[in-house]
Amino acid sequence: MIGGKVMKRNFYFVFIGIIVVGLVSYFSLNNGESTTEGEASNIKELVHDYSTGNVGGNEVASITSHELIVTDSDQKETIYDLPADEFFVSIAPYVTETHPCAIHSLTGCQGELANAEFDIYIEDEEGNVILDEAVTSLENGFIDLWLPRDKTYHSIITFDGKTVESEFSTFEGDNTCITTMQLM
């Protein structure tokens, strides 16, 4: 009888030990790998917080066509998957100064026209109007947009009597940072 209780107790300790080792291994192996959408409670809010500087610390955040990559001061990366149906693009219209960019750095890119109001018109390739309103750029001079994926867009941006027309797309591998729209 006593031997059975000891054996049962040892089984529970071994079982709990296996679970603990499994969890530790899982979290160690997933360091720097993708998280699920459920783990990033609201990826759009997190992206916005990095764009607006509302996230403290020395983290660096960049965003590709399919993931948000956050790197801490110890060079540890945390990667968040972006929504399957929406594409993030950040546009920095300019008059005289710009920088070459393809993958937007939410914590590093700086556009020329910070806190400026633009009239923005965007339509997709079928002529559906996606956006037609006045938008104010962020302190970093960029206008952040979430658009449907896998489309080509025609845009018209107006600022202070100057206009730029451009096309961009939201396919896998497309640029998330658009710094080529010079207002004239």
Image (cartoon, rainbow, N blue to C red):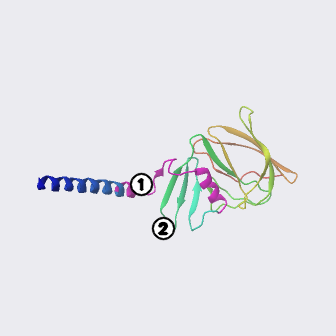
Q: Which residues are magenta?
A: 25-53
Horizontal side of residue 63 vs 8, given as left or right: right
Which image quadrant is residue 160 in? bottom right
Q: Amino acid at mark 1?
A: Asn
**Residue 10, x across and y down, in percent:** 20, 56
Determine the residue positioned at 12% across, 56% down: 2
Horizontal side of residue 82 vs 180, given as left or right: left
Q: Nearer the viewer, residue 109 or 21?
A: 21
**Residue 161, x across and y down, in percent:** 88, 51
Horizontal side of residue 122 vs 151, given as left or right: right
Dot 1 crowding, Cα within 10 Å, few <14, some 14–19, many 20+: few
The disc at residue 74 is: 2
| Badge 2 vs badge 1, beta-carbon distance below 8 Å | no
Determine the residue positioned at 79% across, 45% down: 133
Q: Amino acid at mark 2?
A: Asp
Q: Which residue is mark 1?
A: 30
Measured along the vertical axis of the image, is residue 152 above or below residue 177? above
Dot 2 crowding, Cα within 10 Å, few <14, some 14–19, many 20+: few
